[in-house]
Image: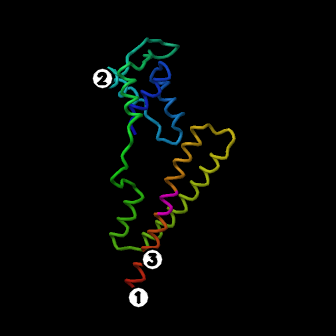
Amino acid sequence: MSTANILLGLLATGPQHGYQLKRAHDERLPRAKPVPFGQVYATLGRLERDGLVEPTGRDRDGGPDRTWYAVTDRGRQALDGWLGSVEPPVPYVTSALFAKVVVALLVADEQLARDYLIAQRRAHTERLRELTAVKTDPAASLGEVVAADFAIGHLDADLRWLQTTLDRVADWHREVHS
């Protein structure tokens, strides 16, 4: 995920300051990891340095100084380029779930791996129920529903992999111990 491009997209809706951008990020991407304030301000600094955003004013509004930023024409072109490009499928598996199963199998403890897989399947199934409830909530925003759909698709893929791996571990156990 490109925080810089997301902030550019949020700024494309109109000038905002860092606090507003952080809040907008967390509201618009409700299932994503919240972006830290420090990352917002560091990213704004890089975007300004690169000519993609520019300060449009300052205010205090009863608190610390706030700098308002707006997207520049160059920033809009960069945003359009990002939005127009296709994301390549990720070539590497970088998942704690995958790593734990592989390590459990490496230490030659198929029972540990099975127990972990079963517990993880249970946790995934519970999360699936929670996300399905979000989708059926009439008060859910379109962003929340789309985020839930995205998470459900990934959870479903994980659940299929968990079951396939459980089956493989069981087959391996039968072969080794028969």
Q: Can you tell which mark lies on residue 170?
A: 3
Q: Is residue 107 above or below residue 144?
A: below
Crowding around mark 3 (Cα neighbors within 10 Å: few <14, some 14 to 19, many 20+) is some
Measured from the top left, where is residue 84 in percent x and y? Answer: 40, 34
Q: Which residues are magenta?
A: 156-160
Mark 2 residue element: loop
Q: Nearer the viewer, mark 3 or mark 2?
A: 2
Mark 1 residue element: loop
Measured from the top left, where is residue 104 in percent x and y? Answer: 38, 67
Q: Amino acid at mark 1?
A: Ser
The image's colouring method is rainbow
Residue at 63%, 46% in the rendered image: 135
Is 163 in front, or is 103?
Answer: 163
Q: Amino acid at mark 3?
A: Ala
- When asked about the image quadrant of residue 87, the answer is top left
Q: Can you tell which mark lies on residue 138?
A: none
Q: Is residue 113 above or below residue 54?
A: below
- The N terminus lies in which quarter of the figure? top left
Q: Nearer the viewer, mark 1 or mark 2?
A: 2
Residue at 41%, 20% in the rendered image: 71
Magenta span: helix, strand or loop, mainly? helix
From the image, tell me which residue sits under label 1.
178
**Mark 3 or 2, nearer chain start:** 2
| Left or right relative to 32: residue 139 | right
Measured from the top left, where is residue 3 in percent x and y? Answer: 40, 34
Crowding around mark 1 (Cα neighbors within 10 Å: few <14, some 14 to 19, many 20+) is few
**Mark 1 or 3, nearer chain start:** 3
From the image, tell me which residue sits under label 2.
50
* Distance from Cα at disc 1 to Cα at disc 2: 65 Å
